[in-house]
Structure formats: structure tokens, C-alpha cells
Image (cartoon, helix red, strand yellow):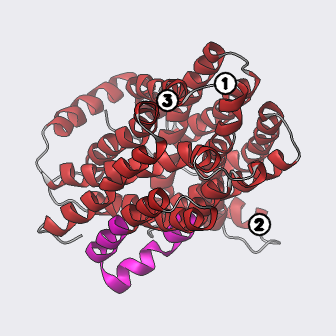
Amino acid sequence: MPLFNYRFIELIASKTKFKKRFKNLGLSAQHRILLATALFFFGMGFCFASWASRIPDIKTFLNLSEADLGSLLFAIPVGQILAMPFSGKVVTRYGSNKIAIFGLLLYAFFLIIAGFSDTVYSLALSLFFFGFFGNFCNIAVNTQGVVTQQLLNKPIMGSFHGSWSLAGFSGALFGLFMISLHLRPFVHFILVFLIIVLIVLFNGSWLVKSKKVKKEDQTDSASKNSSSFFKISDSNLIWFGIICFCGMASEGIMFDWSGVYFKEIIKAPENLVILGYTSFMITMASGRFLSDYLVVKFGSKKVLIYSGIAISTGLYIAVLLPHLISCTLAFMLVGFGVANVVPIMFNAAGRSEKVAPGIALTIVSSISFLGFLIGPPVIGFIAEATSLKYSFALIGIFGFLIALIVSRLKISF
């Protein structure tokens, strides 16, 4: 199922109207569309970061073990996976602009429901729908990113992903503020929902409008792309997907387990539990905005190799030196390493000479997505059987694996 199967027909209004509307502000129509799309990426990341920032509190409130938490975290990927057969078709049929709006609102709404949950079963159900509508939101917003990039005719996807990462940092700081006020997660999540409502109200109309695709046209297009998808003529895309799998598994673990690691292994004070997650998000966001510059200066291959080494080095420092300052610096190193992997690999996949960009991105993102979803829950089971430190040590192998694969690939990124 192609993620980027859409028909882009018109803007939400004419350029003349855009220029007239923003004449006093000095903003062009293109800049306003760019801002709106970036803010939808931001909103999506802000929701996820808000959830991640309160995982330790929710774990304590429900008295969950590592295995219990790992089982609960599976609800999110289950919801995401079950949405996959429908989300791409819905986005194609009804337009990514509309689904981005409804998807983001429902994503934030079920975050509130998760905050209200007082039993394991109600939390699992709310997380399932959080993941389900998160998949719709993810595909629609990324499709908007692709359409906007085509509209502006310049590479900006890296900046959009940087906006998502910046939202993670902002969400972590907001979570720290909520914790310092001793507010329950459901109050925190209600405020997050109100922020999302404001983003939608002031930016939803500026998303690029896409034409509804007739059912018969959609079926024909899907069948053509389906045959192309399963017949992978560029084997490098599989390796790109594996590299992204390793990077996104490391990223997902930091999202879901960094707070727990600081609370249970580092024994950080309550108001500093979120410091590990925050430090990780700072360098990941910064690294994504710097990624294009680093690639131009050093080349994609070197940047990827050193990124893999940074991921592993940071995780092993955290394992071997489980102290507040050393772990904070270690998580910052992991964040900077993780930052470059997905943008560089997605860009490389989109430039494949043998496979159309949309199909290539679908192949790579499908493989990498599994790492982001499956990695964190599996860590819970490993931690229950051994220790959370051993879990982080195991994931540390992924960074070296990235460096090894990249160094062996005889291609130019």
C-alpha cells in the first residue's frame, strides 16, 4: 500500500488572495503554507512527546512492572499496524489535508483518554486508539510534507522532521513544567489538546488541498503500485530500511524508556526524571536541522557511520556510568546520532533510479517503522527478565550495526 498515493490539484485559495491576506505581515503564500505544514508536524510530535514525558508517572500510578509496561506499550503499535490497511486509502480518497486535521485532533483526544485511564485495560484500549489515529495522522501529515515540498520546489522535508523533533523537546519541557506543578497526566493532556485545537484552527485552512479520488481511479492506481511495491528492483532499499530500523528502534527506546531509566537506574530526583529525555530531544532536534549542512560538508556516508558510532557510544556510557551527569551527556550523544539516520536514508531512497520515489519511501519506511514500534515493548520484556541496563546495552549494538552496513554498501548516498 503506497503511503504517498495522492492527486494534488489546487491550493486552498489563489496566490492573489494569499498575497493580499498577508500583505501587511510581509509573508508570502508559500511561507504561510510552509509554516502551517511545519506546525502540523510540530503538533504530532508534541502529542507523542507529551505521552512519553508522563510514562514514568503512569507506570507508578498503576503500579506496573517493566513487563507490564512493555505489554501496554504494544497497544500503540497494534493500533498503528491495524490502521495501515485503511489509512493510506482514506488519505488518498478524502485528501491528506482533511485527514491531517481530523487525525491530529483524534490523536490528541485519545491522549486525554489515556490520561483519565485508571486501569490497565482502559489504558491499553486508549493507547490502541492513540496508535490507530496516530497512523492516520502520520501518513496524512507526511503526505502534506511531500506535497508542500513539490509546491515550493526545494528540499524541506528535513526541516519538517526537525519540527517534529523540536516538538519533542518542547513537549518534554512542558511535561517537566506540568510535573513541577504536581498536575495529574489527564490535566496535562487536556492542555495539550487545547494547544492542538489552536494549531488546527489557525493553520488547517492553509494546508494544501487535494482532490478526492474516485473509487475506481483509486483501485486502478493501488493495483499498479501494489505490483511495483512487492517487486523490489533496487535491493539497496532493503538495506536502507534495515539501517532505518536500527535508528528508529534506538529512537523509540529513548522516547519510551529514557524517563524510566533515569527514575529507576539513575535514581534521579522526581523533578529531574525527565532530564534524560529532554537532553536526548535537544540534540536530536538540533541534529536534524544541522543534518543537511553536515552532509554537504562531510558526505552522507561519513555522517551515517559516525552517527551509528555516536548511538552505540552514548548507550554504553549510560550503561557503564549510570550517574546523572554522565547519563545526561550520553543521551545527548544518542540524540545527535539518531538525528541524521532517517533524513539521510529517506532522501537516499527518494533518489533511487530503479524505483519511483513514493514506492521507494514506502519500502524503507515500512521496514523502519517496525523498529520504532516493536523495539520499546520488547525492551520491557528483556528488562523484566534481566535489567533495564542490559536492555540498553543490547540496543547499543544497533548503532555499530548501522556503521557496519553503511561502510559495506558500495553506493553513493
In the image, residue 391 lies at what x, y percent?
41, 44
Corner quadrant of residue 201: top right
Tag 2: residue type?
Answer: Phe
**Main secondary structure of the magenta stretch:** helix
Q: Which residue is mark 1?
A: 63
Residue depicted at 70% across the width and 57% down the height: 170
* Closer-to-camera residue (255/60): 60
Q: CA distance from mark 3 to mark 1?
A: 13 Å
Which segment is the magenta one? 284-309
Element class at badge 3: helix
The residue sitting at 33% across, 51% down in the picture is: 246
Where in the figure is residue 305, as x and y percent of width and height? 29, 70
Name the secondary structure under disc 1.
loop
Dot 3 or dot 2: first in sequence order is: 2
Instruction: Please name the residue that numbered disc 3 is placed on.
Output: 70
Which marked residue is nearer to the observer: mark 3 or mark 1? 1
Residue 22, labelled with which disc?
A: 2
